[in-house]
Image (cartoon, grey):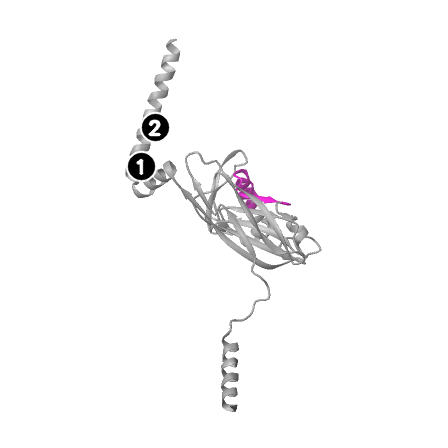
């Protein structure tokens, strides 16, 4: 009898040891609708609805970002103080091609810093600037602040670098969780590829949890055909492009010549 009890205790102990570690916090809920965007001939941007749940006492920041890489830009300046011209090339390293940030409050208000800076959270354009390095074509370091501000202005004009304060709304929940929602405006200039939609849960000025989902952007129809020809059959693509340009020029010349005769 004692032996049986001992065996039961041994197997029970082994079972407890083999159990996976417990997780006191429930996993974050994060959903995208749609999770796939199709770029067709008439595509002019769209909206992705982001919904989920976070702890009741927390705030939320949603960030859509793309793959990081290097971007080359022409640097303009005055030659001899008279003429504006290209003065060389600058390269921005570790820069994402898109950076859309939606928050329930301003990033500065969510920070724990008394000065209200964005550095504590690692979110926002001030924080992004510190993650980017800029060099010239001569390999010399450049002043990040001015060049990054100009680059951000360019991206903002394309709706690719945008910050929306109060862009996350909350719905009534219970004592533990509350629901949130945000409508993310996807700009027309977004390229095909995979993008990361990340939810940051903010509490007491710090990121306490985060969750991510993949947003897929695909080309379909005529844009997909053009892209395929340009990458896979570049010679044929070049001939077709030249032929179309010539035909368009001849057509416009014919139309305007008829108008002149009238």
Q: Look at 36% across and 14% down and name the residue there.
A: 257
Nearest the viewer among 86 and 151 is 151
* Mark 1 closeness class: few <14, some 14–19, many ≥20 residues within 10 Å: some
> Which residue is identified by label 1?
237
* Mark 2 closeness class: few <14, some 14–19, many ≥20 residues within 10 Å: few
Residue 149 part of the magenta segment: yes
Q: Secondary structure at mark 2?
A: helix
Using the image, determine if residue 121 lies above or below residue 73: below
Using the image, determine if residue 238 lies above or below residue 13: above
Q: Is residue 8 left or right of residue 247?
A: right
Q: Quadrant of the image for the C terminus?
A: top left
Q: Position of residue 235 (x, y in %)?
A: 28, 38
The range drawn in magenta is 147-166
> Which residue is identified by label 2?
245
Q: Position of residue 212 (x, y in %)?
A: 52, 55
The mark nearer the N terminus, 2 or 1, is: 1
């Amino acid at each position: 009898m004692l032996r049986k009890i001992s065996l039961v205790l041994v197997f029970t102990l082994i079972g407890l040891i083999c159990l996976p570690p417990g997780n006191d916090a429930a996993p974050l809920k994060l959903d995208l609708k749609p999770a796939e965007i199709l770029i067709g001939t008439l595509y002019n941007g769209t909206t992705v609805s982001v919904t989920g749940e976070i702890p009741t006492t927390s705030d939320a920041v949603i960030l859509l970002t793309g793959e990081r890489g290097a971007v080359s830009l022409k640097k303009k300046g005055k030659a001899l103080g008279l003429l504006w011209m290209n003065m060389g090339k600058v390269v921005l390293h570790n820069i994402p091609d898109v950076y859309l940030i939606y928050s329930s409050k301003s990033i500065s208000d969510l920070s724990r810093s008394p000065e209200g800076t964005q550095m504590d959270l690692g979110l926002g354009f001030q924080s992004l600037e510190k993650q980017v390095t800029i060099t010239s074509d001569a390999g010399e370091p450049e002043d990040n602040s001015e060049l990054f501000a100009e680059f951000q202005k360019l991206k903002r004009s394309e709706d690719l670098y945008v910050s929306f304060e109060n862009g996350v709304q909350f719905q009534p929940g219970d004592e533990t969780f509350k629901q949130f929602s945000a409508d993310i405006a996807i700009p027309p200039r977004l390229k095909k590829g995979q993008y990361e939609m990340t939810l940051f849960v903010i509490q007491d000025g710090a990121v306490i949890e985060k969750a991510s989902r993949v947003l897929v952007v695909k080309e379909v129809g005529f844009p997909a055909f053009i892209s395929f020809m340009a990458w896979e059959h570049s010679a044929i693509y070049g001939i077709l492009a030249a032929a179309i340009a010539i035909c368009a020029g001849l057509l416009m010349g014919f139309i305007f010549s008829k108008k002149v005769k009238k």
